[in-house]
Image (cartoon, rainbow, N blue to C red):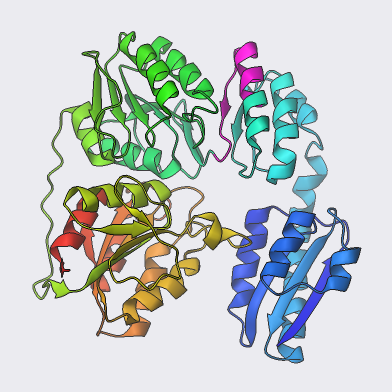
């Protein structure tokens, strides 16, 4: 194997763009690995772990530099890959030149230029995110902190600062929000309505907003708070602010709270606030049957589908049309999820039916299982977890990240059903269903049953119907919700 690196001094590009470029380069013949990263110490360690870093480059590259790192079968393949990477970066820089000349160089400058903005969306590397969030709060801006890897101490300091200023920090690792009907980050095109949602999970918020839209309803706001907000360490600082705002919002008539089970002390604090609200509240704690709710205005649900049914009063028992040749097979379920909350909900459905489930991100009764495990039981994987995405794009951005585990599942004689989610919306790949169909067709007809759920709407950029048809044409069984997909997967296997 040949390792070749190139350093672009003083070059910065958004991490999502770098990851997409890396994914394209990896498809080249003779390329085993290709990664583009800014030269921070953390990123250098990621490159070492991926076995693509030249130590001479590690010593010379600074956090202001971009490292192009390639591992290839031969020197020619490596050189051509580096050349293509440099060309792609130069092309992007050239096309962006006019826009960047007029762009403000600081957050304060952007706030001044925008005039009446009251929210900053921050997606810098985690090491710099807290500094930018502090600057935004000082400018009187609410913060949506898309960045992950923000220290807990920084999160606490930021949220206390926001509370003192009458502002909110959404996040860190807040991937989805809807503010006044405007979708932010990974979000679907959904209907405006009267349901206000507070969510500690991105795809959980997406699923609820999509199901409400399909029921002919809609949301007023969807406020993400970050996965740690309801822990006892953080104490629901942003959640309590969001609840206060939705209680006061004249366009919100029903409030929904989505989270994994909160810390015990935080649960008591949150439910004390909920019980005092004048608006009805539906809570989905993803597997928790009861978290101390005693007020008549609060309903507890276990799954996202049940949450929408209870909140709306509309049953969602859409019949599932199976292919004529569909039949259950002996074996287990292999779930490969882009959405962490969708993976969690599927675990709850399976374990609730008495099935034994293992996952790299276990909830409820599921056991811990890493992606290298050889166990033959039901295995559900969150492919957006750190072990799959360090130095790589999230599978919602680049669905080919799922190719290798999908190919492995299709070839495993112990797998009876492959369970997938397909998440549409702004920020997501423009054809995730097409990528799945490509892998299935390349594998051939001898394969496990494939069950999938498409989380999206007809007005999403990808189009719900068009994406569904691509999967149906490839022989995939589709379910009307993520919870239904898990139930269908159970019926299609005999374990």
Magenta-span inclusion, residue 184: no
Question: Residue 394 at x, y = what percent?
Answer: 53, 57
Above or below, 98 relative to 302:
below
Q: Quadrant of residue 422?
A: bottom left
Q: How many marks?
A: 0
Horizontal side, residue 362 vs residue 112: left or right: left
Horizontal side, residue 85 vs residue 242: left or right: right
Q: Quadrant of the N terminus?
A: bottom right
Residue under the image location 27 percent in, 47 percent down: 348
Magenta span of residues: 158-173
Residue under the image location 24 percent in, 15 percent down: 294
Residue under the image location 82 percent in, 72 percent down: 6
Question: Residue 87 at x, y = what percent?
Answer: 76, 72
Question: Could you tell me if residue 209 is visible in this image?
Answer: yes
Q: Quadrant of residue 134?
A: top right
Question: Residue 238 at x, y = what percent?
Answer: 52, 23
Hey, which residue is sitting farthest right in the picture? 60
Q: Quadrant of residue 170?
A: top right
Horizontal side, residue 364 vs residue 152: left or right: left
Query: Which residue is at the front of the view, 236 or 96?
Result: 236
Q: Quadrant of the C terminus?
A: bottom left
Query: Which residue is at the front of the view, 98 or 28?
Result: 28
Above or below, 185 relative to 7:
above
Residue under the image location 42 percent in, 16 percent down: 269
Magenta-span inclusion, residue 168: yes
Question: Could you tell me if residue 480 is visible in this image?
Answer: no
Above or below, 281 relative to 353:
above
Query: Which residue is at the front of the view, 269 or 264?
Result: 264
Query: Which residue is at the front of the view, 298 or 115?
Result: 298
Question: Residue 174 at x, y = what percent?
Answer: 53, 38
């Amino acid at each position: 194997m040949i390792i070749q690196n190139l350093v672009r001094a003083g070059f910065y590009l958004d991490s999502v763009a770098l990851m997409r470029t890396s994914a394209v380069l990896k498809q080249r013949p003779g390329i085993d690995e290709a990664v583009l990263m800014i030269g921070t110490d953390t990123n250098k360690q990621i490159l070492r772990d991926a076995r693509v870093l030249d130590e001479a480059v590690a010593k010379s590259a600074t956090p202001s530099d971009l490292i192009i790192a390639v591992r290839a079968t031969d020197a020619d393949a490596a050189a051509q890959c580096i050349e293509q990477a440099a060309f792609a970066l130069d092309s992007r820089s050239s096309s962006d030149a006019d826009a960047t000349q007029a762009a403000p160089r600081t957050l304060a400058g952007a706030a001044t230029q925008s005039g009446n903005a009251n929210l900053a969306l921050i997606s810098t590397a985690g090491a710099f995110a807290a500094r930018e969030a502090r600057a935004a709060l000082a400018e009187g801006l609410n913060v949506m902190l898309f960045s992950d890897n923000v220290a807990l101490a920084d999160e606490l300091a930021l949220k206390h600062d926001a509370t003192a200023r009458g502002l909110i920090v959404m996040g860190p690792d807040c991937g989805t929000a809807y503010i006044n009907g405007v979708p932010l980050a990974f979000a679907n095109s959904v209907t405006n309505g009267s349901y206000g949602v507070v969510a500690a999970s991105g795809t959980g918020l997406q699923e609820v907003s999509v199901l409400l839209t399909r029921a002919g309803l809609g949301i007023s706001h969807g406020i993400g708070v970050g996965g740690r907000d309801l822990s006892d360490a953080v104490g629901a600082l942003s959640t309590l602010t969001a609840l206060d705002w939705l209680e006061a919002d004249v366009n919100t008539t029903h409030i929904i709270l989505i989270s994994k089970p909160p810390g015990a002390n935080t649960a008591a604090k949150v439910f004390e606030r909920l019980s005092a609200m004048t608006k009805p509240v539906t809570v989905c704690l993803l597997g928790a049957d009861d978290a101390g709710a005693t007020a008549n205005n609060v309903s507890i649900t276990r799954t996202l589908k049940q949450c929408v049914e209870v909140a709306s009063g509309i049953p969602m028992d859409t019949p599932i049309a199976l292919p004529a040749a569909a039949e259950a097979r002996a074996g287990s379920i292999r779930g490969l999820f882009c959405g962490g909350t969708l993976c969690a909900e599927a675990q709850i459905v399976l374990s609730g039916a008495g099935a034994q489930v293992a996952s790299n991100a276990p909830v409820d009764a599921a056991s811990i299982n890493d992606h290298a495990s050889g166990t033959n039981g039901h295995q559900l994987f969150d492919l957006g977890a750190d072990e799959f995405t360090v130095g790589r794009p999230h599978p919602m951005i680049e669905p080919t990240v799922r190719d290798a585990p999908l190919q492995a599942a299709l070839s495993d004689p112990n797998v009876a059903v492959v369970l997938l989610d397909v998440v549409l919306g702004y920020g997501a790949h423009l054809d995730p269903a097409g990528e799945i169909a490509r892998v299935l067709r390349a594998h051939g007809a001898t394969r496990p049953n494939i069950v999938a759920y498409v989380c999206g709407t007809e007005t999403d950029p990808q189009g719900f119907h068009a994406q569904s048809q691509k999967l149906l044409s490839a022989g995939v069984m589709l379910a009307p919700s993520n919870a239904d997909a898990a139930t269908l997967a159970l019926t299609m296997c005999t374990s």
